[in-house]
Amino acid sequence: MPRVYLKKATLTAKSDASDVHATVQTILNDIETGGDAAALGYAAKFDKYEGPVLLTPEDIAAAAAKVPQKLKDDIAFAHDNVRRFAETQKSTMQDVELEIVPGLIAGQKTIPCQAAGCYVPGGRYSHVASAIMTVTTAKVAGCKHITACSPPRADEGVAPAIIYAANICGADEILSMGGVQGVAAMTFGLFGLPKADILVGPGNQFVAEAKRILFGRVGIDMIAGPTDSLILADATADPFIVATDLVGQAEHGYNSPVWLVTDDRTLAEKVIQIVPSLIDDLPEMNRNNAAVAWRDYAEVILCDNREEMAATSDEYAPEHLTVQAQDLSWWLDRLQCYGSLFLGEETTVAFGDKASGTNHVLPTSQSAKYTGGLSVHKYMKIVTWQRATREGAKPVAEVTARIARLEGMEGHARSADVRLHKYFPEEIFDLTGTG
């Protein structure tokens, strides 16, 4: 049977897309021209903050003193998990070399970016976990300089827990500046910072647009939209846990889609029944976000079988994908398009968001069809090299000359010719392909 929508979204993440491009472009232009002073002007305007921009060791120590020991222990736990997982990822990247033909050796070398700029949101929520995810992976990758940037609050600056987390994870500088002005400061190398080679980390639509505009001048992890989550569940799933996980992700923002895909109508109907009461039980800000997200963006989709469920999931290509169903190995082998996968009731997106070790900076808005999330690999350049003996260069030069002339690229052909004539002056070569 075709999919049945027991609940259909009235809006999508793109429905709310407003034209912020002109605003962001203006700010970037002003700051690139006006430098530190322009950035400070925008910080005063948008952040309502006029305190220190680059935190000193004394500022960091003062912030650390405000963080309870239990929270420090929790940050250390999460940092250790993220670090060890990132180290394992890095171990999969190796320098290699291969003798292509006798005497011609080509190789691959991995080189980390020199300077990374890590954006850590600090508006509605203090995203301690984002500091851990972005700074730790940059450190493991081997970036020589890491700047952590986070929006300050008017009365206190950057949240102390964010400062503490960024510091212990390896940030070389902590920039107390948010939004487009923070991104610009890292990109343009303001306040004595090195110019960032890569910008990473989540942010609001203005931060995302700034990264989009700057891409090319700097690398970026991805252009992120509102966070989204999909749950695949069969009749064995616990409807209360399914509903709780949906609501937990809907609280991210009013336009954060959550989707349930199932082959069991009874489960679907129970989840639809349970969700409103779970939303009502949240604190006010969380409740407001989740209520609108569920009302306008959520979907509950009934499929005929698990293959149809998997196909639906791959079409949606969610940022977060949870499977609460039998035969988890089948799902792991079958599913293709997701940012991060959570298999079984015993794990949940919240684990990945905060502390389990996998990274929570993930592709949204169906971009999981072509990319994965943040990892050490994002900070690494894979470059190639080659060297050759004169004998090893000989057959390659002959073929290069003939292909280049076929393409009409005479200058390329002569770069090959000159070597053949120098190294083998007594030989006659067919360098045109005409015999």
Image (spheres, rainbow, N blue to C red):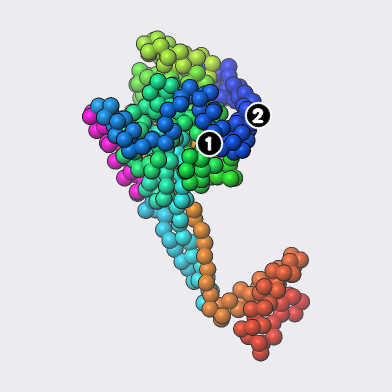
Task: Tell me the tag on residue 36.
Answer: 1
Say which mark, if any, is on residue 65. Answer: none
Cα–Cα gap, marks 1 and 2: 21 Å
Quarter holding residue 149: top left
Q: Is residue 154 in the magenta section?
A: no
Q: Residue at x 59, y 45 (%)?
A: 216
**Image position, residue 158 (x, y; %):** 39, 28
Q: Residue furthest front?
A: 37
| Residue 225 shown left or right of residue 409 in the figure | left
92 is higher (above) or lower (below) than 53: below
- Most prominent secondary structure in the magenta stretch? helix
| Number of disc labels | 2
Residue 244 vertical position relative to residue 229 in the rendered view, above or below: above
Position of 68 with respect to 233 (left or right) is left
Magenta-tinted stretch? 69-87
Q: Which residue is mark 2?
A: 22
How packed mark 2 is, by other alpha carbons closer than 10 Å (few <14, some 14-19, many 20 or more), is few
Q: Quadrant of residue 3?
A: top right
Query: Is residue 433 visible in this depiction of the protein?
Result: yes
Q: In the rendered view, tell whether residue 143 sits above or below residue 184.
A: below
Q: Position of residue 110 (x, y in %)?
A: 45, 57
Note whether residue 74 is visible: no
Residue found at the far left of this picture = 69
For the C terminus, the quadrant is: bottom right
Identity of the residue drawn at 25% across and 27% down? 68
Q: Earlier in the sequence, mark 1 or mark 2?
A: 2
How would you rate the neighbour count of disc 1 (Cα within 10 Å): few for under 14, some for 14-19, many for 20 or more?
some
